[in-house]
Amino acid sequence: MDISTLADDDLLRRTESLALRERISRADLIEHLAEIDRRGIYPGRNYASLFEYCVHRLKMSEGSAYRRIRAARTVLIFPPVLDLLRDGRLTLEAVALLHVASKESDFPSLVLKASGLGTRQVEALLAGRRMEKPSRDSIRYVGLRAPSANPPVDFNDGLFRIALCEPTTEIVSSKVPAVPAMKNEACPPPAVAKRSVRFAFTADEDFYRTLEKARALLRHKYPDGRLEGVLFDALKALLDLRNPGLRWPRGRRDARPSLRAGRTRRAGT
């Protein structure tokens, strides 16, 4: 059906109908996941956990699987949550957040207070309660990262490589044997895609405030505020202090001279 031909009222009506069907379908899915979890039948299908079943068999994203499993386990503890999900008084995100308090005695009244609230409001409602134990740190390889189109240039080798590293061209002729293109030793090796690693850990508010201060101090260097650069610089500073002779990987030494310069200025003052 070509929805571009629909009148405005018809388009809105169909959209609302689809949203209702999606909400009901999602609640039905959560009800089925709760029953699968109650029976514990996923190991018999060669899945180590319900999470693996959702991700690999049902093709959910990790975030979607996480929220739906938490909601399913909340439903097992307090079934009325399912009806609140179906009629929209509780969102999936709200139920996933409420799971941490699902075994507390006042959970039914907490559910009623959370009905109709947004995610941030539910977070505020749960603030100050005894939360779950922090999860274990997680480090996982997630794929390849494409090399940067403009990798950082190391100016501390005494050579400006920009003009020296123009690509060379081989001339191949039927009469003259192919001659390998000469490589300039000053040029860095070609950029290679590196494996990406995802880190996940739980920290307290003091760590968060400290991290935000460090990110603000390095905003000039990392305008996008990516934590990768901030934490990498912090680790380099620590290792540089403990092991000044450490050789950094090519393309990752750009922060070290500035740290030394900072120490020199402080010593001079």
Image (spheres, helix red, strand yellow):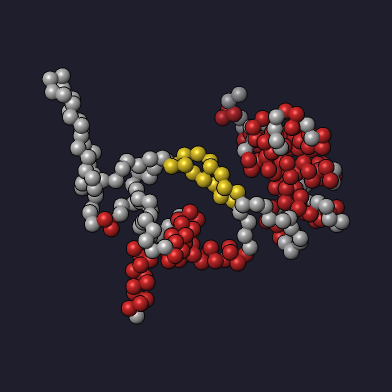
Q: Is residue 229 above or below residue 1?
A: below
Residue 152 visible in this rendered orientation of the protein: yes
Relative height, residue 267 to residue 183 (above, below)? below
Q: Residue 262 or 112: which is nearer the viewer? A: 262
- Residue 246 occupies which quadrant of the picture? bottom left
Residue 177 shown left or right of residue 35 in the figure: left
Q: Residue 14 sits in which quadrant?
A: top right
| Point 53% across, 41% down: residue | 142
Report whether 99 appears left or right of 189. right
Q: How many marks?
A: 0
Q: Which residue in the rendered view is the most extreme toward the left? A: 175
Q: For the point 31% across and 43% down, which residue is it?
A: 189
Camera-nearest residue between 177 and 135: 177
Which residue sits at x=62%, y=60%?
A: 203
Q: Could you tell me residue 91's position as x and y percent?
A: 73, 46
**Residue plotted at (67% across, 52% down):** 135
Instruction: Give the x, y percent position of residue 148.
Output: 38, 45
On the question of residue 121 being in view, the answer is no
* Left/right of residue 236 with respect to residue 11 in the rendered view: left
Q: How far across and how far down the image is residue 84, in percent?
A: 80, 44
Q: Quadrant of the C terminus?
A: bottom left
Front residue (pair 49, 223): 49
Locate residue 237: give its quadrant: bottom left
Q: Position of residue 122 (x, y in %)?
A: 72, 55
Q: Quadrant of the N terminus?
A: top right
Residue sitting farthest toward the bottom: 269
Q: Is residue 125 above or below residue 16?
A: below
